[in-house]
Amino acid sequence: MKIPCLTLSALLAMSCAVAIAAPTSDEALERMRSMKTTGQSLDMKTIPQDGPTADAIRDNLKRIKLPEGFRIDLYAIVPDARHMAVGPSSGVVFVGTRKTDLWTVTDRTKNRTADEVKRFAPAISFTQPGPCFSPDGFLFVAEHNRVLVFPAAEFFYEGPDVAADIVVPTGELIPKDEESYNHGARVCAISPDNKLTISLGQPHNVPPKDKLDLYAEHGIGGIVRMERDGSKREVYATGVRNSVGITYNPTSKELWFTDNQVDGMGDDTPPGEINHAPKAGMKFGMPWYGGGQVRTNEYADETPPEGLTSPVVETTAHAADMGLMFYTGKQFPEQYRGGLFSAQRGSWNRTVPAGARVMFTPFEADGSGPSGETVPFAEGWLDEETGEYYGRIVDVAQLKDGSLLVSDDTAGAIYRISYQGK
């Protein structure tokens, strides 16, 4: 009996029939929720940590000015590095981006330089992921319009499949019609009373009147809190333009946050802000105030409502205040302990550029508020003579040894600042 020859098309059809189609991002997430494999390759995307790029970044770090006794080094090359979350158990750093990637940064040899930078949960396509950890090691990822949780991210991150669950489904963090490319990044933190806290920037330079009620209802242009499973959501603060930095003071247990203020009002106005929100229901100045006590043009003829809260710290106009953290380590000298480090990404709409630096604000021992002026701690990423940026600083985070990590989404890097002594 003759065996018929198979045509190429028939062979292709057979191969397609037996092949297992790669799951979509949503399908992969559902498999992870059921503790099932996604079929992703173990050969995960990694970022080289040496070569010309690393050499050039290290060379640029010679420009950076620090207080006496401190030094700065390249910790990792991480494309589009933005907000960071340090694993409470392993010290692995999870790094969000403004794109679809969430990176893990591992220092296996503990020589204070990353050995490996790898894509986390490669089957999932994130949308501007902003990571934060709970004290018991749950990784929360606040995206533009979804919130996920990875209960054991520090231990599953080595492979492509990680335990995952949905805290806020797609389209329920904000109304679907309010999604926008502008001011779309979310940041999160876990409160001392175990609430998931998320900032929700509003997409306008100044929000129009016909959006104010909707925004207040959903916490857009504000901060929301909820249980860690997504239940009991509340609007914690309103009147915020676009906060991309929130943190809780470990002593007072109260919330502090940065806010990026109105563009197009001139080089030196309005100021940026660092705000204090010790209780729920507080209202800040937007849209009546563009920053500090500066009234917006759009609402100049409106009478602001009573009870608005002013910023505690006014910062350089348009310097773009971003991530912030209270220092709890012991490596740095005494005057830095309990103080607030904050990142300024740098301006885009000033005739004389400003920002691209790490700032420091000393705090009272009880955490109630600043005890001194906000001053530059690390600067030099902006060439003040030419106006050229060598980097743009987004976030600060503390490693377990008490050193300070600084992310730069323009150079695509994370730096480590350590104290060497006088």
Image (spheres, helix red, strand yellow):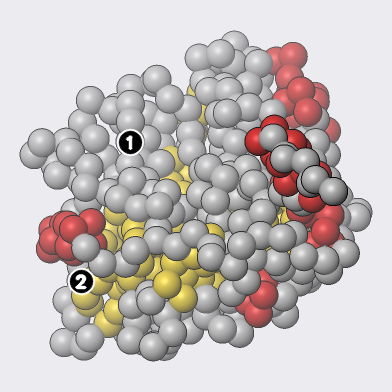
Determine whether 150 is above or below 16 in the image: below
Q: Nearer the viewer, mark 2 or mark 1?
A: 1
Amino acid type at image mark 2:
Pro
Circle 2 packing at 10 Å, graded few (<14), some (14-19), many (20+), is few
Q: Choose between 349 and 303: the one closer to the eye.
A: 349
User: Which residue is painted at 28% across and 28% down in the image?
Assistant: 350
The mark found on residue 347 in the picture is 1
Task: State left or right for residue 74 relative to residue 151.
Answer: left
* Badge 1 amino acid: Ser
Identify which residue is drawn at 56% across, 13% down.
298
For the question of whether residue 125 can be seen, the reply is yes
Q: Look at 78% across and 28% down and name the residue there.
A: 176
The residue beneath circle 2 is 67
Mark 1, secondary structure of its residue: loop
In the image, 85 versus 334, the foreground residue is 85
Task: Specify whether residue 168 is in view.
Answer: no
Counting from the top left corner in percent of width and height, residue 217 is at 83, 33
Q: Measuring from the top left, give residue 224's x and y in whole percent.
A: 75, 48
Q: Is residue 280 above or below residue 363?
A: above
In the picture, the disc for residue 253 is none
Check whether the beta carbons of the residues at disc 2 and disc 1 lie within 8 A of each other: no
Which residue is located at x 64 percent, y 65 percent? 160
User: Furthest-right residue in view?
Assistant: 232
Check disc 1: other Cα within 10 Å, few if <14, some if 14-19, many if 20+: many
